[in-house]
Image: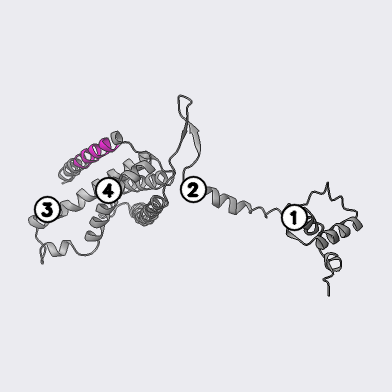
Amino acid sequence: MEFDFYKKYQTLSDAELMHICHNSSKYQPRAVEDARRVLEERNVDIAGYVADTSEVAPKKPSALVQKLGSIFEETAVPRDTWDFDKEGSLQEYAKAPTQVLRWHWVLLSVFTLMTIRNTYFTLQLLLSYIMYPDSIYNNYITLSFYVLWTALEIAIVCGLYKRRAWAWSLLVGYVVVNFGTRMLGLFDIFMDPYTNGIADYWQGESTLYLLGYIGVFILLIQPFMQVFYGVDDKRKKKTLLVSVAIFIGLRILLYLIKNFTI
């Protein structure tokens, strides 16, 4: 029994029938003939037919979704666009490897959480100073230091998100100063030894912070991270020198303040 192409093809769409007609070598002659017959009965111009291949337009994201997407677009999307330099020549940004983006997000996330914690602590100090201005535990010098330090951390978070070179420099300085301050705690052991000696110092947060500062510093000075944040060798050397100088200057300033207040 011969297959009835004509009956079958009456259930097909014009586009499906046109596909058969335009690819006649892939089908039996009888199938192509019946496809043409059905199209002629539908008054379809086979020669001039243009299939409607348009798809349903995707639903446009809501304003909130678009706004959230734009927030992360700058850091989540690797730089692979073109731009012109000051002389007008066309240049291409190097595409950031996926691994570098992951390190960036880890660094940004951890530092953001730490900044939120320190900001909360600073706000508590500020509130205590406002409510109990005459308390012996309130010291405007200490409060001012924490406020400035918190402002620095917030600036670093914003700069890291924007992938700015100055944020890289600030973070390196932040790590150097904090690491040096923690290491000076070792000196206090010899001046005023703990019950168990150095074992007391290496317990708790001290060890965690020291290891964290070392890890962040090693990560920041890696070439791929310097390229990611747009840091050249000149800025790297200058940042390290200035960071050490700031640490020494702060220690001298704190020493003078301590002796002056006493």
Q: Is residue 235 above or below residue 59?
A: above
Measuring 84% from the left and 51% from the top, which residue is drawn there?
A: 46
Kind of residue sitting beneath label 3: Phe
Q: Earlier in the sequence, mark 2 or mark 1?
A: 1
Q: What is the spatial separation of the Cα atoms under label 2 and label 1, in whole angstroms?
A: 42 Å
Secondary structure character of the magenta stretch overall: helix
The circle on residue 77 is 2
Q: Earlier in the sequence, mark 4 or mark 2?
A: 2
Q: Provide the secondary structure element on which disc 3 rests.
A: helix
In the image, the segment drawn in magenta is 236-248
Labels in figure, total: 4
Which residue position is annotated with label 4? 175
Kind of residue sitting beneath label 1: Asn
Q: Is residue 210 magenta?
A: no
Kind of residue sitting beneath label 2: Val
Nearer the observer, disc 4 or disc 3? Answer: 4
Q: Quadrant of residue 195?
A: bottom left
Q: Nearer the viewer, residue 97 or 159?
A: 97
Q: Earlier in the sequence, mark 3 or mark 1?
A: 1
Q: What is the spatial separation of the Cα atoms under label 3 and label 1, in whole angstroms?
A: 86 Å
Which residue position is annotated with label 3? 187
